[in-house]
C-alpha cells in the first residue's frame, strides 16, 4: 500500500511514522508501515527478525550494509544525470565496485553472527550461495581486473595559461605527493580557518575535468573500450533479493531506533501473542506511543493501562470526566493492533492481540463547509460508510460521536451505530459521556477514567474496568456552563 491508511491521523500514527523514517529514505520506507498482515506466520516471522536485531552484535552488522547499498544507489542515480560518456562510465564502475565490496563484506560478517530468526538465517544461506555463484564471482573477478587496468593509467598535464595539454606519462618528475603534503593542513578548514567536519567524497566533475577525462580515454582507447563492454555485460548487477533486503531491513531499523529512547526511559515493549481468529485480547500496561515519545522527551511520566476482552465481549465503552485519558486510551487500542499487524514490538509489558483486516476510526472533526452538509450529517454519512464497510475481522475506534446534537438524539443515534457494529462482531473502543451505552449487551464492557478520590479535579489517567458511575456527563455539563462546585463557590464568596 502506497497511501497512508485513513486511521493514521486519528491514532497519531502519522506522527510516529514521520519520526521513525525521518533519518531514512522516506519515499522507499513509508509504504512498509502502511500494510498490516492477517497471516499469523508472517507476523511471527517479522517478530523473530526484530528479536534478532535487538542483539547489539547482529544490529551492528546492518548499518554498514545499508550505507554501502545507499552509496550504490546514489552513484547509480548520479550516473543517470551525467552528460559526458566517460564520466558516466566511471561513476557506474564505482557503483559496481561498491556493490561487490558491500555484498562480500556483509556475507562474511553475517556468517559469524548468532542468528535465530528464520528471516536472517535464510538470508545468510542465500548470500553464501550468491557470493559463491558463477555470476557474482565473474562480476567481482572482472571488476577487480578492470580496476587494475584503470589503476595502471598514467598521464601528464601541461598547463600553459588557459590551455591544458594531456599526454601519456613519460617519466617526468612527480610532485603531486609534495603538493598534497604542503596543502594537507588546509584540507579540513573552512574559509575562516576553522576546522570543519570532513565532507563526503564528491564524484562530480566540472567541465574542465570532464574534458581531461575524455582526453585520457582517447590516449587509452583499449582500456575504455573494455570498460564499456564490462558495463554492458553487467548492466543489471544488483541482485533482486539483495535489493529487497536493503529496502525491508530499514523498516526494522527505523522502528527500533524510534523506540530505543523510550526503552532507555524505562518504558516496556513486548512481542504480542497474535491471532487472526481468536478475539479474546488483553494488554498489560499499554500506552499511547506518540504521547509517550513526547512525554519521554520532556522527561515526564507515562501512565500505562490494562484492558481485556474475553468470551463474547467485543466493545470497550470508555466513560468518565474530560481530560481523563479516554481518547489516549482509544488511540492506544488502535495503535497496538495496527503495530501488531506489522509484526512490531508493541508498547506494554504483555499483550494478546487480534490481527484485523482494517482499523476504522471516527474522531470529531471540524465542519467541512465545502460539501454543503452540516456537522451532524457529515458524521452520519461517515459512520454509515464505516459500518457498511467493516467486517467481523475489523477494529473500530469511535471517539465521542454525535456531540453536535441533543442528548436524546445522541443516545438514540449512538445506540443505532453501536448495534450495527456489534452485529458485525467487530471489536473496538467507544469513548462517550453516555453511561447507558456501556451496558447495551453482553458484548459491551464498561471502563471508566478515574480521578484522585480526595481531589476529583485531579485526573489519574488510569482507565479501570468498572461500571459507569453516572457522573461523567453531569460533570461535563457543569464545566460547560460554569456551575461546578468550585465555580459556584467562587461566585458566592462575599
Image (cartoon, rainbow, N blue to C red):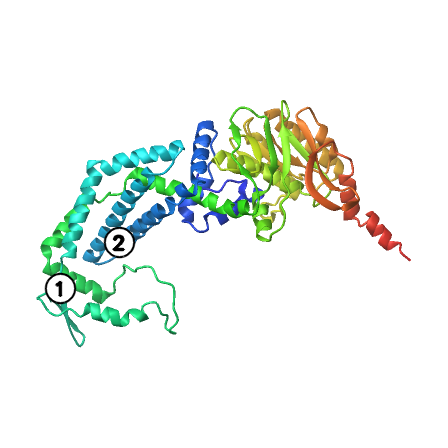
- Tell me: 174 left or right of 74: left
Label tally? 2
Q: Is residue 311 above or below residue 222?
A: above
Q: In screen coordinates, is 109 left or right of 368?
A: left
- Return the x and y of residue 15 as percentages of the image width and height: 53, 47
Q: Quadrant of residue 140?
A: top left
Q: Decide: is 403 above or below 216.
A: above
Q: Are marks 2 and 1 in contact (CB under 8 Å)?
A: no
Q: Position of residue 17 (x, y in %)?
A: 49, 45
Q: Which residue is mark 2?
A: 79
| 479 sits to left or right of 58 | right
Residue at (64, 35) in percent of width and height = 306
| Closer to the camera in the image, 300 or 361 | 300
Name the residue furthest right.
494
Identify the residue under disc 1.
Answer: 155
> In terms of sequence position, does the residue under pointer 2 or pointer 1 come before the other?
2
| Image vertical order of residue 279 relative to residue 176, above or below | above
Amino acid at each position: 500500500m502506497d497511501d497512508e491508511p485513513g486511521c493514521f491521523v486519528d491514532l497519531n500514527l502519522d506522527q510516529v511514522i514521520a519520526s521513525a523514517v525521518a533519518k531514512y529514505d522516506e519515499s522507499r520506507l513509508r509504504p512498509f508501515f502502511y500494510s498490516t498482515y492477517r497471516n499469523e506466520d508472517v507476523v511471527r516471522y517479522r517478530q523473530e527478525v526484530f528479536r534478532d536485531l535487538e542483539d547489539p552484535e547482529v544490529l551492528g552488522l546492518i548499518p554498514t550494509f545499508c550505507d554501502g547499498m545507499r552509496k550504490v544507489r546514489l552513484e547509480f542515480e548520479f550516473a543517470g544525470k551525467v552528460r559526458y560518456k566517460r564520466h558516466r562510465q566511471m561513476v557506474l564502475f564505482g557503483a559496481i565496485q561498491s556493490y561487490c565490496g558491500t555484498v562480500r563484506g556483509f556475507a562474511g560478517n553475517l556468517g559469524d553472527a548468532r542468528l535465530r530468526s528464520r528471516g536472517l538465517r535464510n538470508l545468510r544461506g542465500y548470500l553464501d550461495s550468491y557470493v559463491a555463484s558463477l555470476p557474482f564471482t565473474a562480476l567481482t573477478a572482472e571488476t577487480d581486473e578492470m580496476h587494475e587496468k584503470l589503476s595502471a593509467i598514467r598521464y601528464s598535464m601541461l598547463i600553459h595559461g588557459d590551455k591544458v595539454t594531456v599526454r601519456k606519462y613519460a617519466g617526468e618528475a612527480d610532485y603531486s605527493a609534495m603538493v598534497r603534503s604542503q596543502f594537507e593542513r588546509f584540507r579540513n578548514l573552512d574559509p575562516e580557518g576553522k576546522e570543519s567536519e570532513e565532507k563526503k567524497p564528491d564524484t562530480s566533475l566540472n567541465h574542465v575535468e570532464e574534458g581531461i577525462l575524455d582526453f585520457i580515454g582517447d590516449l587509452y582507447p583499449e582500456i575504455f573500450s573494455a570498460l564499456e563492454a564490462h558495463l554492458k555485460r553487467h548492466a543489471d548487477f544488483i541482485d533482486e533479493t539483495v535489493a529487497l533486503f536493503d529496502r525491508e531491513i530499514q523498516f526494522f531499523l527505523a522502528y527500533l531506533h524510534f523506540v530505543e529512547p523510550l526503552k532507555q526511559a524505562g518504558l516496556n515493549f513486548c512481542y504480542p501473542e497474535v491471532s487472526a481468529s481468536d478475539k479474546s485480547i488483553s494488554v498489560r500496561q499499554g500506552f499511547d506511543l506518540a504521547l509517550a515519545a513526547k512525554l519521554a522527551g520532556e522527561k515526564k511520566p507515562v501512565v500505562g493501562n490494562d484492558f481485556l476482552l474475553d468470551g463474547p465481549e467485543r466493545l470497550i465503552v470508555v466513560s468518565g470526566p474530560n481530560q481523563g485519558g479516554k481518547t489516549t486510551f482509544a488511540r492506544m487500542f488502535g495503535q497496538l493492533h495496527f503495530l501488531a499487524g506489522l509484526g512490531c514490538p508493541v508498547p506494554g509489558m504483555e499483550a494478546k492481540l487480534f490481527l484485523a483486516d482494517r482499523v476504522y476510526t471516527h474522531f470529531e472533526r471540524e465542519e467541512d463547509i465545502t460539501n454543503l452538509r452540516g456537522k451532524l450529517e457529515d458524521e452520519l454519512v461517515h459512520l454509515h460508510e464505516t459500518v457498511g464497510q467493516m467486517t467481523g475481522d475489523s477494529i473500530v475506534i469511535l471517539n465521542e460521536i454525535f456531540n453536535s446534537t441533543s442528548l436524546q438524539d445522541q443516545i438514540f443515534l449512538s445506540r443505532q451505530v453501536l448495534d450495527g457494529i456489534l452485529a458485525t462482531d467487530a471489536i473496538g473502543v467507544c469513548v462517550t459521556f453516555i453511561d447507558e451505552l456501556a451496558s447495551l449487551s453482553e458484548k459491551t464492557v464498561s471502563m471508566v477514567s478515574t480521578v484522585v478520590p480526595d481531589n476529583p479535579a485531579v485526573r489519574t489517567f488510569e482507565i479501570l474496568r468498572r461500571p459507569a458511575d453516572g457522573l461523567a456527563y453531569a460533570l461535563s455539563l457543569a464545566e460547560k456552563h460554569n456551575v461546578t462546585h468550585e465555580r459556584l463557590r467562587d461566585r458566592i464568596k462575599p
